[in-house]
Image: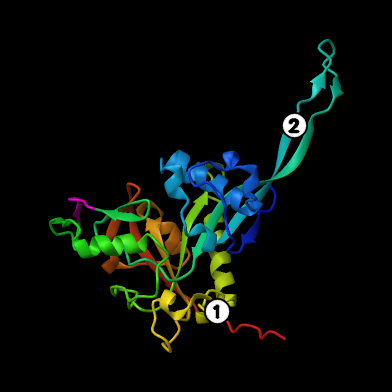
Amino acid sequence: MGTPFIALLEPTPLAWERALPPASQPASASIPRTFLDAMTVRSEVFVQEQNIPQSNEFDPDDPRCAHWVIYASVNQTIAPAVTDPTTGEVIRPRQSETKSLPIGTVRLVPFPHPPHPRKGGVYVDGELINTTTTTTPPNGDTPLPVQPLTSQEQEQARRASTIPTFTPDRPTTLHDGREPYVKLGRLAVTKEFRGRGLAGQLVRTAVDWMRKHPSYFDPSPAERGFEHLGMEQGGTLPRWNGLFCCHAQVDAVRAWEKSGFQVDQEMGEWMEEGIPHVGMFLRVQVEPEAKQV
């Protein structure tokens, strides 16, 4: 494998079919190559390995996200060597070519976000469903029953399935419920290339990019309107100030911790697509942006 390189796809409209794998996307969709490569990695890791439905893996957040894809330069044989069956002499040498193979990806979801997941909740395709599952308190006491959703929570879940607005959230250990944050997720590295630090390289790249572009996702009332932002006219506009979040699979917590993320104990644990998750946060110092001339 040659030296990996990383490509960035900034938010872009996507006319893709969520239920179709990348190789089956219609040619007329004009999907950016970088996003198709991200789909390829995510399909291999989340759909094929973890059995998440294809249509649930790709969601309405994808068009508004920044996506990073890491590639490896891999030498592949396109025609084997041909030898003389009598003498063993090579008549035609092996033919090979070097291809850029997508081997990992991560995405950054801008604010606003749906409410923090409910402790012990069960989520399918981004929606909270009724459940009688139990959740274990951090102190190890007897598991507590999770109550069915109230009508108000059902309505909140319905609204959260659309584009969210800037509304207060419940405070947690590492989030006051009001500060805007960006969320890293869909972190995946194909099986053959794991254990080489590529996941950390992707996270560091995304974090560093956001630190250098802190106002990239700051909202504009002129573009979206105060009402759509969930704000009153003349209110203080939300600005990003260095807070990252991730909804980490429990088995991947250690990998996120290596990048500086901390588990938010108050967020608790919940299920997404049958996989236990926890919330984690990272605080960084933002860099002053260069003024446009």
Q: Which residue is mark 1?
A: 215
Question: Against 266, is 200 above or below?
Answer: above
Q: Is residue 173 left or right of residue 12?
A: left
Earlier in the chain: of badge 2 and badge 1, it is 2
Q: Quick one: which residue is furthest to the left in this view?
A: 142
Query: Is residue 284 shown in magenta?
Result: no
Query: Is residue 132 shown in magenta?
Result: yes
Q: Which residues are magenta?
A: 130-135
Res. 3 visible in picture: yes
Residue drawn at point x = 64 percent, y = 46 percent: 28
Residue 82: give x, y in percent of width and height: 81, 21
Residue drawn at point x = 59 percent, y = 76 percent: 212
Q: Residues within 10 Å of mark 2 (few under 14, many from 20)?
A: few
Q: Is residue 270 left or right of residue 46?
A: left
Query: Label 1 amino acid?
Result: Ser
Residue 244: give x, y in percent of width and height: 45, 70
Res. 197 visible in picture: no
- Secondary structure, mark 2, is strand
Residue drawn at point x = 51 percent, y = 58 percent: 62
Residue 36: give x, y in percent of width and height: 60, 49
Q: Which residue is mark 2?
A: 78
Most common SS among magenta residues: loop
